[in-house]
C-alpha cells in the first residue's frame, strides 16, 4: 500500500477558484478528496503523470481547453430516466394538461432541461409527451436540453445507454417501445431523439438565443451554487418563463427566500414554482 | 437472498419460493400479496410460465408482477410484458433500481 500526500491547499484553492469563476460551482474546504478523484483520471488521460503536474500547467498558461475540461470534470452528472417519479406524475397529470388546454390557440410549447447531463431527463420528457399527449403531434414542440459539459452532451446526443442506465427508472413498456438494442447498448429510437435539441450552455454566462419557456426543468443545479448566483439564475429564469409557465427544481431546492417573484404550487405530491401573478 | 434483504429494508414482509411451482402454491396460500418478483430461469416452472399461470386466474388480474432476471434481450422484455408482467429488471441490479421500479408500480417506498 502506498500513501500519497494529500492535495496541497495551494492546488486546491487554485482549482476551487478556477471552477467557481467558470461555473459558479462551490467546492468547500474538505472536498480535496473529491477534487483529487476527479482530476486524477483527467490528468492521466491528458498525458500528465499526476494531477500535480496538471495543476502546474494550468496555473502558468492562458485559459484553454484544458481548463474547460477541469471545470467539466468537477460537475456532477448523476441522472436517470424519470428521476423522481412524482415530478413526472405532476408533469403528466397536471402541468402538461393545463398547458395544452391554455395554449390550444398557439399550438406551441417550449420546454427547457437546463442541466440535462447525459440526456435521460429530456428523453423522459419526450417519451412522456408521446405517451400522455398524443394530440401534440401537430403542435410545434421544442425540447431544448443544455449542459455545461461537452462530454455529457456528446453522450446525450448519441442517445445510447448501457444496461445499468436503462434499468433505472425507465418503465419496461417504454424500453420496448422507444429503444433499440445493439449488443450491450440500448439506443433511443430516432423519433424520440429528433424531439430533443441539445446545446452547450453555461448557466452563469448570458443565455443566448433561448425562446420564452413554458416549462423549465432546472433540477439539482442550485444546490451547488452560492447564494448570489442562485438569485441571478432564478431572476433570469423568471424573465424567460412564460407568465403561465412552470419552473421545476430539485427536491431539496426552492425559490423561497431567494426570489419572491415565484410562488410554490403543489400537484401530485410534488412542488413546482410559478411566477406570482400581479 | 440479496433481493429479500432489499425488500425487507423497504418494509415488505417477504415470502420466498424456490421455483415457479412452489411460487404458485405459496401465492394461493397467502391471504394477500401486494407484489410478486419472479426470476425467469427456474426449475419446475420457469418465470414466464409462472407469469402466464398467475395472469390466467381472474383473482390475480391486477396483482403487480415484476421479473428480475439475467435475460437481457429486448425480445425477452417484450415477451415478459406480453405474458402479463408489469415491470422488468435486468441483472445485475442495485437496491435503487428495485426501489425505483417498485415506485413505478405505485409503491411509495
Image (cartoon, grey):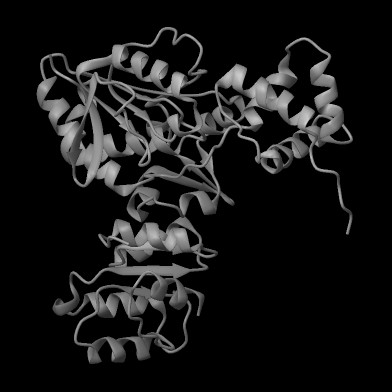
Q: Is residue A63 left or right of residue A98?
A: right
A150, above or below A93, in the image: above
Query: In what quadrant of the picture does the C terminus of chain A appear?
Result: top left
Residue A10, percent from left and from top: 78, 27
Query: In what quadrant of the picture does the N terminus of chain A appear?
Result: bottom right
Residue at coordinates 36% horizontally, 89% vertically from top-left?
Answer: B21
Q: Toward the viewer: A218 or A91?
A: A218
Please indicate, yes or no, whether residue B76 appears anywhere in the rendered image: no
A171, above or below B43, in the image: above
Q: Toward the viewer: B86 or A11?
A: A11
Residue A269, percent from left and from top: 21, 47
Residue at coordinates 57% horizontally, 31% vertically from top-left?
Answer: A152
Residue A226, percent from left and from top: 49, 25
Q: Quadrant of residue A155?
A: top right
Q: Quadrant of residue B29?
A: bottom left
Residue A104, percent from left and from top: 11, 20
A278, above or below A165, in the image: above
Please indicate, yes or no, whether residue A51 appears anywhere in the rendered image: yes
Q: Quadrant of residue B22?
A: bottom left
Residue at coordinates 65% horizontally, 25% vertically from top-left?
Answer: A71
Residue at coordinates 29% horizontally, 29% vertically from top-left?
Answer: A256
- Number of numbered discs overlaid on the protein picture: 0
Amino acid at each position: 500500500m502506498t500513501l500519497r500526500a494529500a492535495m496541497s491547499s495551494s492546488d486546491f484553492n487554485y482549482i476551487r477558484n478556477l471552477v467557481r469563476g467558470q461555473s459558479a460551482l462551490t467546492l468547500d474546504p474538505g472536498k480535496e478528496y473529491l477534487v483529487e478523484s476527479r482530476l486524477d483520471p483527467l490528468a492521466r488521460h491528458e498525458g500528465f503523470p499526476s494531477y500535480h503536474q496538471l495543476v502546474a500547467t494550468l496555473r502558468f498558461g492562458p485559459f484553454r481547453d484544458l481548463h474547460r475540461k477541469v471545470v467539466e470534470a468537477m460537475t456532477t452528472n448523476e441522472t436517470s430516466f424519470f428521476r423522481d417519479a412524482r415530478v413526472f406524475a405532476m408533469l403528466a397529470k397536471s402541468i402538461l394538461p393545463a398547458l395544452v388546454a391554455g395554449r390550444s390557440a398557439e399550438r406551441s410549447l417550449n420546454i427547457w432541461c437546463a442541466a440535462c447531463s447525459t440526456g435521460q431527463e429530456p428523453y423522459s420528457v419526450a417519451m412522456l409527451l408521446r405517451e400522455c399527449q398524443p394530440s401534440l403531434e401537430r403542435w410545434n414542440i421544442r425540447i431544448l436540453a443544455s449542459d455545461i459539459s461537452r462530454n455529457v452532451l456528446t453522450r446525450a446526443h448519441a442517445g445510447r445507454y448501457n444496461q445499468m442506465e436503462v434499468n433505472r427508472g425507465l418503465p419496461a413498456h417504454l424500453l420496448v417501445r422507444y429503444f433499440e438494442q445493439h449488443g450491450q447498448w440500448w439506443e433511443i429510437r430516432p423519433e424520440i431523439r429528433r424531439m430533443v435539441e441539445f446545446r452547450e450552455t453555461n448557466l452563469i454566462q448570458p443565455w443566448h438565443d433561448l425562446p420564452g419557456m413554458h416549462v423549465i426543468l432546472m433540477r439539482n443545479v442550485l444546490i451547488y451554487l452560492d447564494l448570489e448566483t442562485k438569485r441571478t439564475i432564478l431572476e433570469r429564469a423568471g424573465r424567460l418563463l412564460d407568465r403561465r409557465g412552470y419552473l421545476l427544481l430539485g427536491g431539496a431546492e426552492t425559490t423561497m427566500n431567494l426570489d419572491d417573484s415565484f410562488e410554490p404550487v403543489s400537484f401530485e405530491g410534488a412542488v413546482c414554482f410559478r411566477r406570482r401573478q400581479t | 437472498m440479496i433481493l429479500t434483504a432489499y425488500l425487507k429494508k423497504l418494509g415488505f414482509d417477504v415470502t420466498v419460493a424456490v421455483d415457479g411451482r412452489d411460487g404458485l402454491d405459496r401465492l394461493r396460500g397467502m391471504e394477500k400479496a401486494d407484489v410478486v418478483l419472479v426470476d425467469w430461469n427456474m426449475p419446475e416452472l420457469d418465470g414466464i410460465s409462472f407469469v402466464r399461470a398467475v395472469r390466467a386466474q381472474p383473482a390475480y388480474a391486477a396483482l403487480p408482477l415484476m421479473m428480475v432476471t439475467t435475460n437481457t434481450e429486448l425480445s425477452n422484455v417484450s415477451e415478459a410484458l406480453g405474458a402479463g408482467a408489469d415491470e422488468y429488471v435486468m441483472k445485475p441490479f442495485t437496491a435503487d433500481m428495485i426501489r425505483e421500479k417498485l415506485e413505478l408500480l405505485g409503491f411509495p417506498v
